Image (cartoon, rainbow, N blue to C red):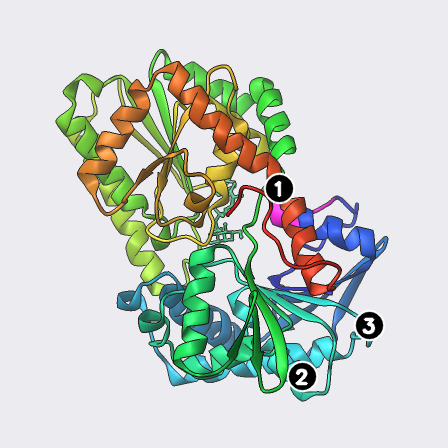
């Protein structure tokens, strides 16, 4: 039983859901058979019956939510309290008693709905910050199933995370699982430090903790991508029309690429600022490079996102006004999603991949960029040291995204890097991506959750 906020129900033709995570979880469910449960994405003011769609061995069970539920649980507590706190942004955190109550109420509602589907031997894998208290409600109802939780975003240090409303309830909710998984060792350390500070659980060693007579495992399970598939898509993207149009428009200029949801955690404004700083300090680079930032809008219903959308657009406009010419637009800023093949082709065309979040659980774009490169002439990844991916991809050019000048220098270093060094760095990163794909991630987590083997990171990932 997989639980996530949005459920990628396949179309009636049965075509699989797009996206690495959806594909991997689908594959795991196909192997074992089971349910994927969550929100339908639809609003309904009446309590409607659970909608179940069967596709082969996998069934998708979704439920509607009322507008109030969505406002309080999703747009409110999840995205205006949990998300900023977990990304170390107390300045953007909005605390509202209604939102907090709504978050727990909707979790209890999901637990009651899920309870109608559960069999005693079902193994339940719950995803992300929307559903932290789900296990606690299910335990209260008497369910003793194996329950695992994976947090896709960071867990902040004690002094930051303890500012969360209902912090102790949120924290204790996590102790009701059998396995609590994080992206990185740093997140595990931050989380277990919180347990110690609150004296909420006892350390039994080897990642095992005990709270209220229940033993649970805490570990890092760094998420991967479909490495080979991405490489293949990148190779085949030569004939993709969007990629061809892009290449034709570049003439002999170098392409620098950024791809992110429009989210303040991704550091997009700071990245464009660093690019502008690079053009200011290295005039020889003007007219030689183009920065393409592909950024679909996200969570526009959350006020902090609207403000940031204006700031990023302003920064892109300002940079083009200051440095652009009649025949050169330094920043191409695009607010739309593109297909995976196009994305892979664009990554492959780019000499530099800029992945500079201010804080990120993992960041799959960093891994996709590396996987898409040509081994004989790979591009360079400029990666924020605050992305979870930096723990594995330490052969990237690691930067502090708050340091504009240092990031500008890193862009120049990437553009001027010798072929030999580019190949060396790329090879080291590819080895990591091959040894920890999204299938490994899924299998590792499931192995620990079903107690088939002890928890272990893939070789070389520590
Ligand atoms: P996100 O914050 O969404 O994920 P990320 O890991 O980068 O961030 O994943 C984004 C995905 O969306 C990538 O697969 C990317 O290719 C795709 N994407 C982004 N922009 C796109 C565009 N314009 N068109 C098409 N596709 C686009 C959360 C956490 C991350 C964690 C993941 C997975 O915040 O830290 O890595 O979950 O655990």
Which residue occupies the foreground of this view, 124 or 157?
A: 157
- The reply to whether dot 2 and dot 3 touch (C-beta < 8 Å) is no
Residue bearing the label numbered 2 = 139
Query: Which residue is farthest right?
Result: 56
**Magenta-highlighted residues:** 16-22
Q: Position of residue 206 (x, y in %)?
A: 57, 65
Which residue occupies the foreground of this view, 453 or 78?
A: 453
Which image quarter: residue 207? bottom right
- The reply to whether dot 1 and dot 3 touch (C-beta < 8 Å) is no
Q: Position of residue 115 (x, y in %)?
A: 74, 79
Residue at the image position 35 percent from the left and 58 percent from the top = 305
Instruction: Compute the Cα span from label 1 to label 2.
Output: 32 Å
- The reply to whether dot 1 and dot 2 touch (C-beta < 8 Å) is no
**Res 121 label:** 3
Element type at mark 3: loop
Q: Count the marks.
A: 3
Query: Which residue is farthest front?
Result: 205
Residue bearing the label numbered 1 = 437
Q: Quadrant of the N terminus?
A: bottom right
Q: Is residue 346 visible?
A: no
- Disc nearer the start of the sequence (1/2): 2
- Disc nearer the start of the sequence (1/3): 3
Q: Position of residue 131 (x, y in %)?
A: 57, 71
23 magenta-colored: no
Q: Is residue 418 visible?
A: yes
């Amino acid at each position: 039983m997989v639980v996530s906020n949005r459920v990628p129900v396949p179309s009636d033709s049965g075509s699989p859901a797009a996206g690495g995570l959806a594909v991997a979880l689908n594959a795991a469910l196909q192997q074992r058979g089971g349910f994927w449960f969550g929100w339908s994405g639809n609003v309904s003011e009446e309590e409607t019956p659970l909608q179940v769609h069967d596709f082969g061995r996998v069934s998708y069970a979704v439920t509607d939510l009322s507008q109030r539920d969505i406002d309080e649980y999703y747009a409110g507590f999840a995205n205006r309290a949990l998300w900023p706190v977990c990304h170390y942004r107390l300045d953007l955190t909005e605390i509202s008693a209604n939102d907090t109550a709504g978050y727990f109420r909707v979790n209890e509602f999901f637990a009651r709905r899920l309870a109608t589907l559960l069999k005693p031997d079902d193994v339940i894998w719950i995803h992300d910050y929307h559903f932290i208290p789900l296990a606690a409600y299910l335990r209260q109802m008497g369910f003793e199933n194996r329950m695992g939780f994976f947090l896709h975003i960071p867990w902040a240090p004690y002094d930051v995370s303890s500012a969360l409303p209902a912090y102790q309830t949120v924290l204790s909710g996590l102790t009701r699982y059998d396995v609590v998984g994080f992206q990185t060792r740093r997140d595990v350390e931050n989380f277990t430090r919180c347990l110690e500070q609150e004296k909420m659980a006892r350390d039994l060693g080897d990642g095992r903790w005990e709270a209220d007579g229940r033993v649970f495992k805490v570990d890092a399970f760094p998420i991967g991508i479909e490495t080979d598939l991405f490489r293949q898509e990148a190779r085949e993207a030569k004939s993709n029309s969007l990629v061809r149009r892009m290449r034709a428009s570049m003439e002999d200029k170098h392409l620098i690429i950024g791809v992110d949801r429009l989210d303040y955690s991704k550091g997009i404004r700071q990245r464009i600022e660093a690019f502008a700083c690079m053009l200011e300090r290295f005039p020889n680079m003007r007219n030689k490079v183009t920065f393409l930032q592909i950024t679909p809008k996200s969570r526009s219903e959350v006020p902090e996102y609207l403000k940031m959308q204006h700031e990023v657009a302003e920064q892109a406009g300002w940079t083009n006004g200051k440095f652009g010419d009649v025949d050169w637009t330094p920043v191409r800023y695009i607010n739309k999603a593109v297909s995976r093949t196009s994305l892979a082709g664009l990554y492959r065309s780019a000499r530099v991949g800029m992945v500079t979040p201010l804080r990120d659980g993992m960041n799959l774009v960093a891994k996709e960029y590396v996987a898409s490169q040509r081994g004989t002439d790979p591009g360079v990844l400029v990666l924020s040291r605050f992305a979870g991916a930096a723990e594995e991809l330490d052969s990237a050019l690691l930067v502090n995204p708050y340091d504009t000048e240092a990031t500008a220098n890193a862009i120049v270093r990437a553009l001027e890097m010798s072929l030999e060094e580019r190949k060396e760095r790329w090879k080291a990163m590819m080895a990591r991506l091959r040894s920890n794909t999204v299938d490994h991630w899924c299998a590792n987590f499931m192995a620990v959750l079903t107690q088939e083997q002890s928890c272990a990171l893939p070789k070389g990932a520590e």
